[in-house]
Amino acid sequence: MRITDRDISKEELNDIYDDFKKIEFQDGVPSNNQVRYQFIAEEKDIIIGFVSGLTNHKWFYLSDIWVHENYRRQGLGTKLLVMLEEKVKSIGIKHIWTWTTGFTNPKFYERQGYYIFTIFEDFCEIEGYHQIGYRKDLD
């Protein structure tokens, strides 16, 4: 056996991921075909808001939520998030989770009914600037 720190090829990595799927299948886990759902807010053909994420069995990973700075604190982020939550709930998603950082972002999620499941304290060089995992149960 030899252990090295070389880069893995895409083909090699795909073989490993295929084996992960094989193990899950042997464990009885149903196939998971991730689907992206998203909503885009536009004004005069310019994107001013965006929310997006991926299904993962009964969970949904909220990967992105963004509002142009000229439209922040006017309810657009909340509207986009609620639309996405309603959409994924309608297809049977039971839970949603996301990561966020900063000082104001956590307050946004908490107002939307999300609660903390983990915190990586002082995640970067700014003291008190944490990486926070939030979740919300949709049922």
Image: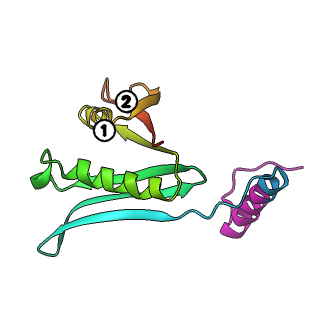
| Residue at 28% in and 55% down | 80
Magenta stretch contains residue 9: yes
> In screen coordinates, is 42 left or right of 126?
left
Specify the amino acid type for callout 1: Gln
User: Residue 114: x, y in percent?
Assistant: 38, 35
Please name the amino acid that badge 2 sits on.
His
Start-end of magenta stretch: 1-21
Circle 2 packing at 10 Å, graded few (<14), some (14-19), many (20+), is some
Q: Identify which residue, 123 or 101, lies in the foreground.
A: 101
> What residue did someone put label 1 on?
112
Q: Nearer the viewer, residue 14 or 58?
A: 58
In the rendered image, which quarter is residue 66 located in? Answer: bottom left
The residue closer to the viewer here, 11 or 98, is 98
Give the residue number, with chain letter if any, for mark 2.
130
Give the SS element for disc 2: loop
Q: Is mark 1 on a helix, strand or loop?
A: loop
Q: What is the crowding at mark 1: few (fewer than 14 residues within 10 Å), some, or many (at least 20)?
A: few
Q: Nearer the viewer, mark 1 or mark 2?
A: 1
Q: Residue at x 65, y 60 (%)?
A: 32
Pinpoint residue 44: horizontal percent, then vertical percent: 11, 74
Distance from Cα at disc 1 to Cα at disc 2: 19 Å
Q: Looking at this rendering, what residue extends furthest in the right direction?
A: 1
- The image shows residue 36 at horizontal and vertical percentages of 47, 64
* 3 drawn magenta: yes
Q: Earlier in the sequence, mark 1 or mark 2?
A: 1
Q: Where is residue 69 in the image (x, y as percent from the top left)?
A: 14, 52
Residue 15 lies, with reference to residue 71, above or below; the image says: below
Query: Toward which corner of the image does residue 129 lie, by quadrant?
Result: top left
Q: In which image quadrant can residue 99 be found?
A: top left
In the depicted view, which residue is nearer to us: 9 or 44? Answer: 44
Q: In this view, does 136 lie above or below 63?
A: above
Left or right: residue 110 compared with residue 99:
left
